[in-house]
């Protein structure tokens, strides 16, 4: 028999994951603080509950799809949280983008109760979530991962076991660090091309036929930036949060990250200047404003003269 599942968090990603779990034949109990999020699953067999402890009592495996570590900790360990009804043999799978240090603390607390945990953050955005083709990076005990692989395959196209508790969340933050770097650098280049009279769609076509291409230029520019819809479904604030997770992990290892730190300052500035709730692809609009404000850097002129 398939294990009974619980899912906490029915946003853009969690809601899509739920539909694929149901399609795969799992019984899913769901919880979300937003009635609107729950209402989007009214045409499915998902069973909503009003208390986390009820969900924890019913489910053999509980999945989380939540915005950040603080919310994860509250949902799991807080008053009225999952921990109040967890019992030995159950499994918690956190698909959120969380801090590795927080994940390790939660896993340690649950282990004392006989409850296993996996961190299994996902990547691919809303589009691939709807298609059931997310990438999943898993941290935790390998035997637990092997037992839960079928659950992850319901919404994940490629699944990677990357190490112990927190390893999945670290890899996810590093993936988003790279994504943020390529998107910001591509935006800066595209803005220069446009200011020089080159049509942006032509510029992106050229880049995508050349070795400067990336997921940002191949997917995000054509779908969300060229038409200025900026609606990929992942907020700039969440991207900025993930950059902080990556840089905090680097600090723990006493590893300098000059490139990551420089780009992180751009995203942090965007979040601080009113873009946190906007889509992360709106970094293009932020950079348009920022580049109009900044003076031409002396090193740019010097580099040109030296060249």
Image: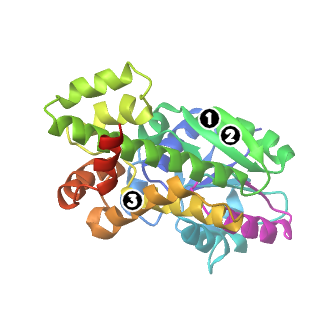
Left or right placement of residue 242 versus residue 219 in this view? right
Furthest residue toward front: 306
Depicted 128 relative to depicted 188: above or below: above
Left or right placement of residue 15 versus residue 70 in this view? left
Q: Quadrant of residue 268?
A: bottom left
Using the rendered image of the protein, determine whether residue 31 is visible from the camera's viewpoint: no
Q: What range of the chain is rendered magenta?
A: 96-118
Depicted 194 relative to depicted 46: above or below: above
Circles 1 and 3, Cβ within 8 Å, touching? The answer is no
Q: The residue tagged with tag 1: helix, strand or loop?
A: loop
Query: Does 100 lie within the magenta span?
Result: yes
Q: Nearest the camera: 211 or 131?
A: 211
**C-alpha separation, residue under disc 3 versus residue under disc 2:** 34 Å
Depicted 38 relative to depicted 228: above or below: below
Q: Position of residue 10 (x, y in %)?
A: 47, 54
Circles 1 and 2, Cβ within 8 Å, touching? The answer is yes
Query: Viewer-nearest of labels 1 and 3?
Result: 3
Q: Earlier in the sequence, mark 3 or mark 2?
A: 2
Furthest residue toward top: 209
Instruction: Check the picture and name the quadrant holding the N terminus.
Output: top right
Q: Position of residue 3 (x, y in %)?
A: 73, 45
């Amino acid at each position: 028999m398939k294990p009974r599942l619980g899912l906490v968090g029915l946003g853009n990603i969690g809601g899509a994951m739920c539909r694929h779990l149901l399609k795969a034949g799992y019984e899913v109990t769901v919880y979300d603080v937003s009635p609107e999020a729950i209402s989007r699953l009214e045409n499915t067999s998902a069973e909503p509950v009003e208390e986390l402890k009820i969900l924890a009592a019913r489910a053999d495996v509980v999945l989380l799809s939540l915005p950040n570590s603080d919310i994860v900790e509250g949902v799991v360990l807080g008053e009225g949280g999952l921990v109040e009804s967890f019992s030995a043999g159950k499994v918690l799978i956190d698909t959120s983008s969380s801090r590795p240090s927080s994940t390790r603390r939660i896993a340690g607390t649950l282990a004392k109760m006989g409850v296993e945990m996996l961190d299994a953050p996902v990547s691919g955005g809303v589009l691939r979530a709807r298609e059931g083709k997310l990438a999943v990076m898993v941290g935790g005990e390998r035997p637990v991962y092997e037992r839960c692989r079928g659950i992850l395959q319901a919404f994940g196209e490629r699944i990677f076991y990357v190490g112990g508790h927190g390893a999945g969340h670290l890899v996810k933050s590093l993936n988003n660090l790279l994504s943020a770097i390529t998107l910001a650098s591509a935006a800066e280049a595209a803005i220069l091309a446009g200011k020089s009279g080159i049509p942006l769609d032509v510029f992106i076509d050229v880049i995508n036929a050349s070795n400067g291409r990336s997921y940002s230029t191949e997917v995000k520019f054509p779908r969300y930036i060229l038409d200025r819809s900026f609606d990929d479904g992942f907020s700039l604030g969440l991207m900025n949060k993930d950059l902080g997770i990556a840089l905090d992990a680097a600090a723990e290892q006493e590893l300098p990250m000059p490139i990551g730190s420089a780009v992180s300052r751009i995203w942090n500035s965007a979040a601080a200047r009113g873009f946190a709730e906007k889509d992360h692809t709106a970094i293009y609009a932020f950079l348009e404003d920022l580049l109009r404000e900044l003076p031409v850097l002396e090193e740019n002129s010097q580099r040109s003269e030296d060249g």
